[in-house]
Amino acid sequence: MSTPAGPTNAELAALRRPAAGNPTWRAVRNYQAINIVVLVTLFLGFCTGYSLLYPDQLRFASLGNLSVLSQQVPVTAIVAIGVGLLMIGGEFDIAVAGTFTLVPFVVAITSAGSWGWPIGVSLLAGLAVALLIGLMNGMITTRLGIPSFIATLGTMFFMRGVIRFVSLNPTTKQPDNIAFFPGDALKALLGGQIIGPIYAQMLWLIGVALIGYALLNRHRFGNHLLLTGGNRDAAVAVGVPVRNVKVTAFMLCAVTAGFAGILQGVRINQVEPSFATISGLELKAIAAVVVGGTSLFGGRGAILGIILGAVLIETVDNILVLISAPETIFKGFLGATTILAVILNTVIGRRARR
């Protein structure tokens, strides 16, 4: 009986030989957010170039417009980072718009009028409310086994009712805006101009992004989150505290939404009942996350991709405003882009598993 021949010297040499191609280029090509990096770079380059060549037709590159973008993009991106971390863990939070609106209401009400709390205490109280909202969503989802979509849908409607109640004008019996001016120092810290079109919101986005990156890519929590979202059974089998990981992700999601709401309130010096509950911030955030390469099924995502997804969506919205396009066009773009991103992410995920 003949025995199977072992590998030849040539075959052994081929196995030892490094794979063809530059390792750095391969790493860049295989980066999960490379598609959105290329897309946003090309899109911003085109918009900037066209604006510089034809400033009368498109004022995208004007100082005023860039100032608006540098204040609005960070707000959406900060919300999207929290939503993205939660989606990587395999869950959804469609109540972020309510958290985004309720938290600055808490800060504005407790720091003014008969309450008169110090602004620092009010800010902590607002963020504590956000933590409680995230904890509640997480406990309902993990302890009661209710799908996060349903749990946070109920939370969203509940918070809309609370917001309507706390913003009710006793004279008109209708929800009304609440003035919110936290003082010159805090306004400068949270939303002051740094230089040119760069405002403090951009620095806060960088800070939140670095924290998100550290948690996801440099901390054990990130490993647990990726494994929980990618394969829950495997995570349980190796001893990952799946419930605690998901509850923590819900709390991070709520805190980022609440903090973004505070930044928005400081920016416009008031808190509006319809801050985000009508404008669909939760859908915009989810779209940014999906467009940024995060899998809807969990287990895959990158902070840079999430941020660039928010940049793309806010830039398109900005362009449509500049050219006076109907709002319905943006909603159509948002829906179509989300569907295409889901299809692309699904195909990429299948190839990666192979």
Image (cartoon, grey):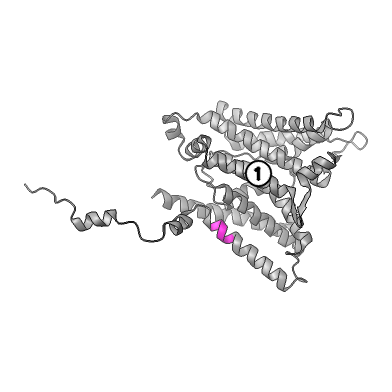
Which residue is situated farthest in the left direction here? 1
Magenta span: chief secondary structure: helix
Q: What residue do we see at 62% from left, 41% from top?
A: 82
Q: In the image, is 57 to the left or to the right of 296? A: right
Residue 322 in view = yes
- The residue that disc 1 covers is 207
Residue found at the far bottom of this picture: 53
Q: Is residue 36 magenta?
A: yes
Quarter of the image where one finds residue 56: bottom right
- Element under disc 1: helix
Task: Report which quarter residue 212 is drawn in.
Answer: top right
- Location of residue 164 by image quarter: top right
Magenta extent? 35-39
Residue 350 vs 231, above or below: the answer is below
Q: Residue furthest top?
A: 143
Above or below 177: residue 198:
below
